[in-house]
């Protein structure tokens, strides 16, 4: 029946997480209704509860409202098409082999614990009750699952496609949907089809849930985006305006959807790395990190300390780079023209370092399963040291230029305010959460990749407004500099990559000696590694909030399902909640303060 | 000023032609100058490739604008759409007529010169409002609305702020106002008038931080969203003309116009105007944009009282 998650073969991330998980399991056994759930074993040690469509809402409600130290955040909601899965992956005994499973991931910031709820579904009954009454951010997640898997959610207020065009046929993340255009007939566009597509684009306020006139005035609808100077990519907000005041706003996403999750199902474990770079395209190798960590966790690969430290250093360099772009564009979006130029100069210096170390700039795809691609080059320490000496003075200058500017403060203080409870409700993580006063940083709460060895502070602010979100990020730049300095002063020696057979080819001399290593070399370089069967998810504190790759392996050379949970997706969903009633200019400040990139939203 | 009474036709024509040409050339050069200055302050080169120091960038831009498709959207109110950008050019160039550049240089000495300038600067508003309205585009409409509200409001303080100068000089004639400053520039006694006029002038020319009608980050390009080619070029040059005109006027009203030691009068006028123009550009490089309602609040709650108090104080001092 309920196998304990702790009796697993692979080592757990660390003891404390295991303790938190065990405490939770004991608690739920004591208090919750046994019929509600069964347990599954997962490589990441997240307690994984299986439940039924009939019980899921009761279980979620219990976890959100009844249990002490509740799971206040719906961290992720997605699905897995299980129909082609061959291997046994620890499904609870006595359960039917499902066709689809819907996966909820919850986070308790008090327990520092992620848990997973799975609901198995059969093909002939693909529907579930909606969780939108429990979490407002379930809205988009459920639409996404409907769009990509065709699983319906009863009671959802507005179950429409979110990523794909409304005229799309089929549900792309199902295993029977083609992955490449070459698998289907060539694309043709008849006049009739063109008309139909054009008609589908027509804007009808009622379809967006908006009325076209109020009590005493007709509203104006303004289509802000997908092409607009300050929506940071292809993001569209339909605005219902009364003069310049926003009555209602409805964000529309999907213009940047490239099917990164589907692509993962075709790419070898290693060759998917460059795709991750392009998820949060300002985050560079920061995107590689959750992916490789999840895989290492799955396969039980131990990463040498030097590789860990190099990873931390590179990730923090990219955090600074991303925050600098944020800082500059934030100032620019409230009309300040110059700061972005100065910050891009700093970013250029950063890219100089990144280039010297990795050979790439924005998308180095430089982390590897088990370590990094190369050792640090000669003279890297000098470059990093120079940057560390150079940056603080620049930050001080920006402080006076941007943060102390009275006009900027007037534009951003008290605008776009939410409190901690709202933030958790909406799935807000990262600086946006810390700006509400909650001191919660995953690097401190569930340290990974050796973060527990570093000294740094977690900056917070109390107002939860646009200005505070900026202040927190600026302070984070300083903290990142501290971390980088510690990396620089204490860079361990040793290998930069694990010698695990799944990650690194055997030494060349040995392949000349015996056939086994030669075969291994050949297989790893032709198929790529074969990851063990299992599920693994590894959240990290990325530049914009919590980012994780939930990897399902069916024991193949490619992933069976890769779910990319990105911070920007829930962040955007909150826009109407914090901007309705304000003016168009405020909306721009809010959008700027969220710090998103559309690739991170649509994937 | 004895020579002014009977100017020859030729001299007048030379004056008119020269000033028109100079104004347009300076405005065009300013499109380059501004980008170079911004580049200088923003640690980047700016346009430096075409000709010496990139000076021929202006020519390149002109050629580009002239050869662009002269696009008029079908949904626009076409006659108004075409007319709108010309208004700003005409109004601003007319404004130069009353500007006393130096003794003997200047088109006309109206005894209501100042009022004429105010009239012309009000005319320029129509350009923006009509352009925004005729484009039949929502961003343009919002831009036009903002322009109407902003310019009409700031026009009020602009007028009032100048009354102190008029009282002290006792005339609306700009040339005489300059001559009245021989004892000392009006920037000292009329410092608040100067401040208000400077702010209102920036607002009138829609320059950052008062560029709300075209606020790029909110309204894409505001009132000129639908404009392209030379029609856009006219809005563009019109804006620079108004920057130069406002700077010239501030020079005339508060900084003693062409007055100054050693150098010839024309040089003094140009130097002072140039410094102000550079200041305009610096503002753009430095300051964020307030929100629309904050701008209006600032106007009515700060600028208006300041200009009124300034007016009353000036009157009180002059009478006593």
Image: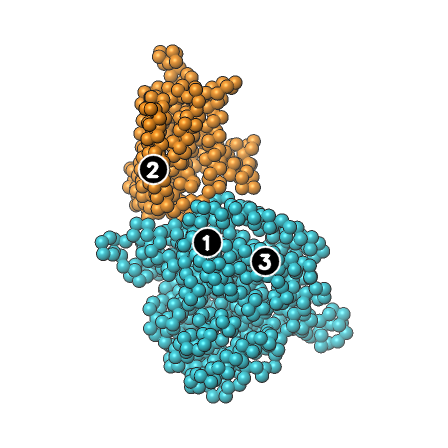
Residue drawn at 33 percent across, 27 percent down: B316
Q: What element carries label 1?
A: helix
Badge 1, how many Cα within 10 Å: few under 14, some, many 20+?
many
Given this view, does label 2 or label 1 mark the residue nearer the observer? 2
Q: In this view, does A451 lie to the left or right of A50?
A: right
- Residue name at image x 49 percent, y 54 percent: A470
> In front: mark 3 or mark 2?
2
Q: How far apart are marks 1 and 3 (CA)?
A: 20 Å
| Chain to which the residue tagged by mark 3 belongs | A
Q: Name the residue under label 3.
A: A480
Name the residue that disc number 2 marks. Answer: B305
Q: Please state which of residues A264 and A382 is positioned toward the viewer in this rendering.
A: A382
In percent of width and height, residue A590 lies at: 42, 55
Report the Cα–Cα distance between label 2 and label 1. Answer: 31 Å
Q: Which shade is chain A?
A: cyan
Question: Measured along the vertical axis of the image, is residue A452 above or below residue B139?
Answer: below
Q: Label 1, on which residue?
A: A467
Q: Where is residue A252 shown, x and y percent of the image?
A: 39, 60
Mark 2 neighbour density, 10 Å: few (under 14) some (14–19) many (20 or more): few
Instruction: State the SS at label 2.
Output: helix
**Which hue is chain B drawn in?**
orange
Q: Do the residues labelled 3 and 2 touch (CB within 8 Å)?
A: no
Closer to the camera in the image, A284 or B306: B306
Residue A207, image x, y percentages: 31, 62
Q: Is B178 displayed left or right of A460 in the figure?
A: left
Q: Is mark 3 on a helix, strand or loop?
A: helix
């Amino acid at each position: 029946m309920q196998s304990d998650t702790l009796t697993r073969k692979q080592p757990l991330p660390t003891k404390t997480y295991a303790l938190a998980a065990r405490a939770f399991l004991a608690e739920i056994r004591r208090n919750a209704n046994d019929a509600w759930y069964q347990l599954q074993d997962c490589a990441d040690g997240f307690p994984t509860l299986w439940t039924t469509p009939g019980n899921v809402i009761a279980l979620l409600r219990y976890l959100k409202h009844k249990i002490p130290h509740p799971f206040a955040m719906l961290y992720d909601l997605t699905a897995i098409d299980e129909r082609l899965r061959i291997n046994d992956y620890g499904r609870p005994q006595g359960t039917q082999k499902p066709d689809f499973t819907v996966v909820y991931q919850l986070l308790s910031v008090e327990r520092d614990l992620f848990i997973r709820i799975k609901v198995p579904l059969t093909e002939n009954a693909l529907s579930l009750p909606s969780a939108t009454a429990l979490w407002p951010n379930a809205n988009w997640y459920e639409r996404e699952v409907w769009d990509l898997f065709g699983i319906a959610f009863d009671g959802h207020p507005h179950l429409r496609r979110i990523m794909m065009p409304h005229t799309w046929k089929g549900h792309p993340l199902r295993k029977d949907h083609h992955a490449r255009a070459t698998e289907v007939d060539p694309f043709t566009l008849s006049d009739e089809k063109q008309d139909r597509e054009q008609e589908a684009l027509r804007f009808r306020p009622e379809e967006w849930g908006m009325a076209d006139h109020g009590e005493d005035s007709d509203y104006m609808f303004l289509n802000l985006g997908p092409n607009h100077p300050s929506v940071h990519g292809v993001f569209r907000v339909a605005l219902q305006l009364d003069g310049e005041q926003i009555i209602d706003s409805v964000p529309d996403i999907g213009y940047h959807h490239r099917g990164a999750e589907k692509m993962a199902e075709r790419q070898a474990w290693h060759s998917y790395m460059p795709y991750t770079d392009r998820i949060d395209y300002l985050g560079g190798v920061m995107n590689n990190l959750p992916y490789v960590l999840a895989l290492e966790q799955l396969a039980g690969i131990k990463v040498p300390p030097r590789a860990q430290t190099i990873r931390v250093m590179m990730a923090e360099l990219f955090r600074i780079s991303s925050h600098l772009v944020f800082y500059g564009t934030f100032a620019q979006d409230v009309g300040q023209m110059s700061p972005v130029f100065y910050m891009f100069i700093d970013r250029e210096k950063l890219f100089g370092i990144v280039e010297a170390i990795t050979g790439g700039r924005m998308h180095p795809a430089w982390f590897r399963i088990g370590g990094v691609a190369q050792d640090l080059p000669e003279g890297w320490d000098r470059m990093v040291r120079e940057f560390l000496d150079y940056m603080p003075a620049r930050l001080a200058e920006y402080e006076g230029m941007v943060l102390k500017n009275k006009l900027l403060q007037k534009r951003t203080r008290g605008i776009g305010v939410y409190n901690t409870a709202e933030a958790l409700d909406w799935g807000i993580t990262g600086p946006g959460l810390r700006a509400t006063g909650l001191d919660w940083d995953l690097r401190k709460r569930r340290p990974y990749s050796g973060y527990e060895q570093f000294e740094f502070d977690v900056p917070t602010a109390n107002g939860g407004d646009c200005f505070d979100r900026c202040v927190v990020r600026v302070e984070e730049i300083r903290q990142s500099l501290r971390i980088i300095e510690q990396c620089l002063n204490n860079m361990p020696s040793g290998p930069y990559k694990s010698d695990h057979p799944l990650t690194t080819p055997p030494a060349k001399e040995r392949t000349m000696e015996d056939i086994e290593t030669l075969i291994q070399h050949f297989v790893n370089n032709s198929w790529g590694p074969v990851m063990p069967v299992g599920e693994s998810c590894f959240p990290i504190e990325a530049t914009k909030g919590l980012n994780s790759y939930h990897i399902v392996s069916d024991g193949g050379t490619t992933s069976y399902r890769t779910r990319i949970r990105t911070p920007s997706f829930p962040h955007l969903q909150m826009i109407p909640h914090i901007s309705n009633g304000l003016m168009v200019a405020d909306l721009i400040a809010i959008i700027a303060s969220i710090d998103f990139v559309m690739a991170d939203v649509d994937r | 000023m004895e020579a002014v009474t009977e100017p020859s036709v030729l001299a007048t024509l030379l004056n008119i032609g020269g000033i028109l040409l100079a104004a347009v050339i300076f405005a065009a050069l300013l499109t380059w100058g501004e980008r170079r200055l911004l580049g200088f302050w923003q640690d980047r080169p700016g346009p430096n490739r075409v000709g010496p120091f990139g000076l021929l960038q202006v020519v390149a831009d002109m050629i580009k604008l002239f050869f662009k498709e002269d696009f008029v959207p079908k949904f626009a109110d076409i006659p108004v759409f075409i007319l709108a950008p010309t208004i700003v050019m005409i109004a601003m160039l007319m404004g130069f007529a009353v500007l006393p550049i130096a003794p003997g240089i200047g088109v006309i000495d109206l005894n209501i010169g100042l009022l004429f300038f105010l009239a012309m600067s009000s005319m320029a508003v129509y350009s923006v409002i009509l352009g925004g309205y005729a484009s039949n585009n929502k961003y343009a409409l919002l831009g036009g609305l903002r322009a109407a509200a902003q310019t009409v409001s700031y026009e009020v303080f602009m007028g009032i702020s100048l009354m102190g100068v008029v009282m002290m000089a006792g005339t609306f004639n700009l040339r005489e106002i300059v001559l009245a400053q021989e004892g000392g520039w009006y920037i000292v006694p009329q410092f608040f008038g100067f401040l208000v006029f400077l702010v209102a002038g920036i607002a009138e020319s829609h320059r950052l931080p008062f560029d709300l009608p075209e606020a790029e980050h909110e309204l894409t390009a505001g009132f000129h969203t639908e404009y392209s080619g030379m029609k856009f070029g006219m809005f563009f040059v019109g804006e620079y003309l108004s920057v130069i005109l406002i700077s010239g006027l501030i020079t005339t009203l508060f900084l003693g116009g062409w007055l100054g030691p050693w150098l010839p009068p024309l040089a003094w006028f140009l130097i002072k105007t140039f410094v102000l123009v550079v200041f305009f550009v610096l503002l753009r490089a430095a300051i964020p944009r307030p929100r629309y309602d904050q701008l209006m609040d600032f106007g009515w709650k700060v600028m208006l009282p300041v200009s009124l108090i300034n007016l009353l104080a000036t009157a009180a001092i002059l009478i006593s």
